[in-house]
Image (spheres, rainbow, N blue to C red):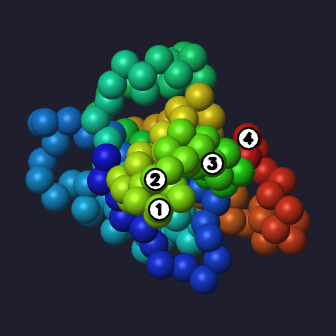
Amino acid sequence: MFFKKKPKEKEADYCVAIFVDEQTEEGVYERLTDQLLYEVDNIGVISEATLSDEMIEPLHEIFPDAEVKAVSFAVLKIDRERIQEETKKMESKYKWRKFFNTIPITEYLKVEDEAMYDFRTTLLYTHHIEEVIEYMKGIEMAEEHDGGHNIHPKG
């Protein structure tokens, strides 16, 4: 997966996976990413992904009527506590490397990626970027309305 992080004052609570395949035209991912980052404020990470069975199964369980194929989008809530827990587990696995501060950054990124993109927690799956934008703007409005207490659908 490739990542684009949006520079922000506060950390965003959501990430989006953009599913592409080998038939996807060059530049599509960049154009979609730019559109999302321009129109929505509460997305922190956008990743390019190729659909695999590990992704398709949970998406079919949550969205049984959806046709899971590229180009499509999955919106997930970032669970920072789970990322911290998984990071601690990984660090305990490499105790001595942690002690000498020699755990490669790739290990941290791998743990973060696996914890963040747990497709069993997908909030929205769609083939239309407009639906992602509408959904995320709805979440933004709900968070503004309730003072940031994160009371909104499925999140």
Residue closest to the eye, 51 or 97: 97
Q: Amino acid at mark 4?
A: Lys
Q: Residue furthest bottom?
A: 9
Q: Position of residue 3 (x, y in %)?
A: 35, 58
Q: Position of residue 111 (x, y in %)?
A: 49, 45
Crowd around label 3: few <14 · some 14–19 · many ≥20 (10 Å): some
Q: Amino acid at mark 1?
A: Phe
User: Which label sits on residue 97?
Assistant: 2
Residue closest to the eye, 141 or 87: 87
> Do labels 3 and 1 touch, CB within 8 Å?
no
> Do labels 4 and 1 touch, CB within 8 Å?
no
Q: What residue is disc 1 on?
A: 100
* Alpha carbons under labels 2 and 1: distance apart: 5 Å
Q: What residue is disc 4 on?
A: 154
Res. 129 in view: no
Q: What residue is disc 3 on?
A: 88
